[in-house]
Amino acid sequence: MKRIMFVCLGNICRSPMAEFIFRDMVKQKGLENEFFIASSATSTDEIIGGIGNPVYPPAKRELLSHGISCEGKRAVQLKWEDYEKYDLFVGMDSSNIRNMHIILKGDKQGKIRKLMDYTSRRGDVADPWFTERFDIAYRDIYDGCEGLLKALLK
Ligand code: 4NP
């Protein structure tokens, strides 16, 4: 069982997209029992009074246009205690990676990765909260997830 945590700033756009795209990919290969998949935020911006916001509607619509539901997902923050509970922490951009090192108090076991490093394009998944390009975010995240799954199945 591989335990994967996708991470972004707010956990309402990119990391939930990655969580549900990766789940769908794994399910299509009949490997759902071999993975535990989750997502979280580095910030508390989308968690109000302890309750996380749902996936941002345009991100939800983009997923649905590809036949992927993210129903029930609400934002949660990454916690230091998660470090032992997951095998990989996959951030969306360089700023996420810096904040993941702070929250997780380093990375002694080398579990922190950046999603686009699993593609030939590398770099960051641009934040669609700011760019409003949910289609580009979907394409980048899909390619990253495909590369990640390939790497894990090697
Ligand atoms: P995400 O996008 O990190 O891809 O979920 C954002 C969502 C919310 C905010 C920033 C980025 N915010 O500032 O609330």
Image (cartoon, rainbow, N blue to C red):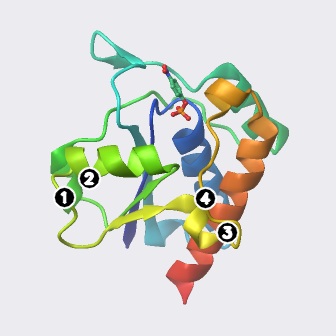
| Residue identified by numbered label 2 | 101
Does the CB distance between marks 4 and 2 fall below 8 Å?
Answer: no
Q: Amino acid at mark 2?
A: His
The image shows residue 137 at horizontal and vertical percentages of 71, 44
Find numbered disc 2 in the image and state the secondary structure of the residue it sits on: helix
Does the CB distance between marks 2 and 1 fall below 8 Å?
Answer: yes
| Residue identified by numbered label 1 | 106
Find numbered disc 3 in the image and state the secondary structure of the residue it sits on: helix
Q: Residue at x 46, y 27 (%)?
A: 74
| Residue identified by numbered label 3 | 146
Chain-order first, disc 3 or disc 1: 1
Disc 3/disc 4 C-alpha distance (Å): 16 Å
Find numbered disc 1 in the image and state the secondary structure of the residue it sits on: loop
Disc 2/disc 1 C-alpha distance (Å): 5 Å
Q: Amino acid at mark 4?
A: Gly
Disc 4/disc 2 C-alpha distance (Å): 18 Å
Return the residue nearer the eye: 153 or 110: 110
Disc 1/disc 4 C-alpha distance (Å): 21 Å
The image shows residue 129 at horizontal and vertical percentages of 63, 26
Disc 2/disc 3 C-alpha distance (Å): 25 Å
Q: Residue at x 78, y 44 (%)?
A: 136
Q: Is residue 103 left or right of residue 48?
A: left
Q: Amino acid at mark 1?
A: Gly
Q: Is residue 146 left or right of residue 7?
A: right
Return the residue nearer the eye: 132 or 50: 132
Q: Residue at x 58, y 73 (%)?
A: 149
Of badges 1 and 4, the one in the foreground is 4
Residue that lies at the very extreme toward the bottom in this rendered image: 154
Where residue 84 sits, quadrant-wise, is bottom left
Numbered badge on residue 123: 4
Chain-order first, disc 3 or disc 4: 4
